[in-house]
Image (cartoon, rainbow, N blue to C red):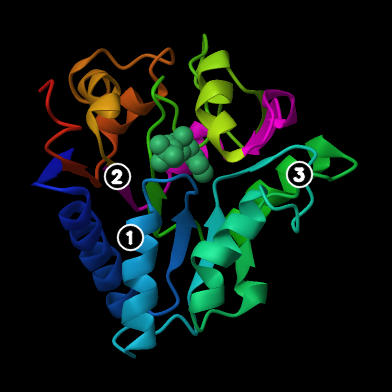
Amino acid sequence: MRIIKAKTYEEMSLAAADYIMAQILWKQDSVLGLATGSTPIGVYNELAERNRQRRLDFAQVRTVNLDEYVGLTADHPQSYARFMRENLFDHLNIKPENTHIPNGVATNIDAECAAYDALIQGLGGVDLQLLGVGHNGHIGFNEPDAAFPLGTHQVTLTESTLQANQRFFERPEDVPTKALTMGIRDIMQAKRVVIVASGSDKAAAVKDMLAGPIVPQMPASILQIHPNCVLFADEAALSQM
Ligand code: F6R
């Protein structure tokens, strides 16, 4: 894994945006795998600004998001579908029909997961997957487990993730306990992976991801064997290295 060390969150976001921009310039109809959460927001702001300045065109770009909460409709204020519209899609010349997010209110969850994997295959696979990393090492919502999950599936979120997500909800009991997420195989099949990490609270996870054993108890450690993965991290996130 290549490591690009930035001094600050802003520097990290610019460097990751440069990388994603290069991907889109090189292949205008790129399939981008996208993440939610706080870390990519700086990258998304920068991509939106470059699109506004007409330096970057999203007219042909297709996107697939990693995950969605089970039980939240696409217009729920805390749904990832809404997050993506507010933080990225509404600010781009991307076609809404080219953006895809798992349906957290599907009546048949298994069918939804299978259809999502088929959709990714139908798009020709992910060209560039953007990831954040959880405090417990999750990528997407692939939580620490006894085995690496393969395709899109439903997960029960761990206590650590529920606590981290609580900041977005008024009451702890409002935080959804289940989510749909692309699996580790979906992520590992992406041609390129970009992972962003910022802040000293991520330092332990970053250290285990980079230097620990490749085990499903630390899902991000699998990225050590991805042939084309770049970590963009600020000094704080790399402070235990
Ligand atoms: C979100 C996702 C998660 C986050 C991770 C880090 O789509 O897939 O894996 O990337 O929880 O979240 P932040 O960036 O909020 O620390």
Label 2 within 8 A of ligand 1 by Cβ? yes
Q: Which residue is mark 3?
A: 104
Q: Quadrant of residue 14?
A: bottom left
Check disc 2 and report the residue beneath it.
Answer: 196
Residue type, mark 3 in image: Gly
Question: 29 or 68, which is in the foreground?
Answer: 68
Around disc 2, counting alpha carbons within 10 Å, would you say few (fewer than 14), some (14 to 19), or many (20 or more)? many
Q: Pointer 1 and pointer 2: residues touching (CB < 8 Å)?
A: yes
Image spot of residue 39 (x, y percent): 36, 46
67 vs 235, nearest the viewer: 235
The picture places residue 70, in percent across and down from the top left corner, at: 75, 37
Between disc 1 and disc 2, whose residue precedes?
1
Is residue 182 within the magenta segment?
A: yes
SS state under label 1: helix
Q: Is residue 126 above or below residue 145?
A: below
| Residue 123, visible in the rendered structure | no
Separation of disc 2 and disc 3 at Cα?
25 Å
Q: What residue appears at the point 67 percent right and 36 percent down from the top-left corner?
A: 170
- Boundaries of the magenta span: 169-196
In-front residue for pair 75/129: 75
Indicate the position of residue 73 as horizontal and vertical percent values: 79, 51
Q: Which mark is residue 43?
A: 1
